[in-house]
Image (cartoon, coloured by chain):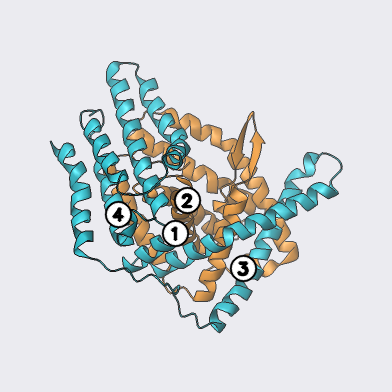
Amino acid sequence: MKGFFERLDPRTRLLAIAAAIVIVTSTPAGALRPFPFYGVAILMLLGTGRASWIHLALRCLAASPFILMAGGLLAWQDGTPAAGRLALSVALKGYSAALLLAFLTATTSLGELLTALRLLKAPQSLNLILGMMYRYTSLFSEEYARMERARACRTVRPLGRRRFSIYGHQFGSLILRSWDRAERVHAAMVSRGFHGSWPSRLQPVFTPRDALFLAAAPALLLIPRLW
Amino acid sequence: MHIADGIIPNLWCGAAHGASWTAMYWLGRRVETEEVVRLGMLASACFVISLIHFPLGGTSVHLGLYGLAGILAGRRAFPVIFAALLFQTILFQHGGLVSLGLNALNMGTGALFAAALWRSDIGAEAVRAFLCGFAGVLIPALMIAVEFAFTGYGKGFYFMAALYTGAAVLEGILTMAIVGFLRRSRPAILGTAA
């Protein structure tokens, strides 16, 4: 079942979350006071959708290495409490942004995001490349797994010094296959009447509800940011 | 090497977004559908390869293939890398929406340098392929180190960039092996870049 957030126009969802991330990440370094308010506002925002909390937590965990490294660098430079504050504010900003982005991707399919990007006049080449990646990455992933299995079956000794050459051949083969597939896919697309953009069943309509949400969601974060 | 949101000040990220979107439009202009399909497939294949981890000095590294993207896609490597980074941001939370421009600029610069080096015809092809792969990793690492140094994180990331030299050598060797394979099996691919 769709929540309130999922029923919004994908453009509204993308722009509202992007605005929220910009506001949170623009908090001056070392300022910790707005974060409890941000926390409440973000929880309210998350409450409008149907994202799984476990999924959101795992996504935030994926963003951890770089956030913790950046925070660690700040704290390591100068072990004073001020440096600790700075590191904490960077980590909080990083995790808040990661949580918001995870919420967007958990509630909005890539197809909807592509539609939003198209309607927001993103370059067509970007949309097409993203669409191809969405469709063919899992296929190439399976193809590579088959190649790897076949190589493992044929290899009885450790790869040793020839490992780079063997992997080079394997990766080169995958690139060749992608090249050949591109020709076939393009011919099939043209034969089906493709004229430069993905056909989409989604016809989102920007309603007053969208306008209200687009104004209210960033405002919830902007008030503590400016206060 | 994907900078997350909230790490680098928004002013820097905004400027990088401006530069990256301009490069995206400029370097992706007048692209034919056939070429876009090929770029999309190339991006998918490179993305799959970049998910494979190799053991290196007690840790593991994965390939970026920015140098190879430069060799195969030429100046179109920038739109390919921009799209691949957006894809990774959306699906895997690597990087962020605000830092997307900065990440694209860092990695796209490495790819564009590799494209220019490849087309320069200087030296033996194997050496050029190695240097393309090597520079494709080291240039982004150095750019991140500079960005961190200028935004108050000190010089700690230069140490990280030095560690990336090992990964850059590995990438250079594998790029050389891939190019060697493509030269023997389908040389036309190496000369079709825009």
Viewport quadrant of the N terminus of chain A: bottom left
Q: Earlier in the sequence, mark 2 or mark 3?
A: 2
* In the displayed structure image, the side of residue B54 where residue B144 appears, left or right: left
Gap between marks 2 and 3, in whole Å? 32 Å
At which x and y percent is residue A96? Answer: 33, 38
* In the displayed structure image, the side of residue B61 where residue B99 appears, left or right: left
Kindly give the residue lying farthest to the right in the view shown. A156
Gap between marks 2 and 1, in whole Å? 8 Å
Q: Which residue is mark 3?
A: B191
**Secondary structure of the residue carrying numbered label 4:** loop
**Secondary structure of the residue carrying numbered label 2:** helix
Foreground pick, A154 / B181: A154
Badge 3 and badge 1 both on one subunit: no
Gap between marks 2 and 4, in whole Å? 22 Å
Camera-near label (2 vs 3) is: 2
Q: Residues within 10 Å of mark 1 (few under 14, many from 20)?
A: some
Q: Which residue is mark 1?
A: A110
Gap between marks 4 and 3, in whole Å? 51 Å
**Secondary structure of the residue carrying numbered label 3:** helix
- State whether residue A94 is above or below residue B66: above
Q: Earlier in the sequence, mark 4 or mark 1?
A: 4
Name which residue lies at 15% across and 41% down.
Answer: A223
Gap between marks 3 and 1, in whole Å? 33 Å
Camera-near label (2 vs 4) is: 4
Badge 2 and badge 1 both on one subunit: no
At which x and y percent is residue A12? Answer: 28, 58
Q: Which residue is mark 4?
A: A4
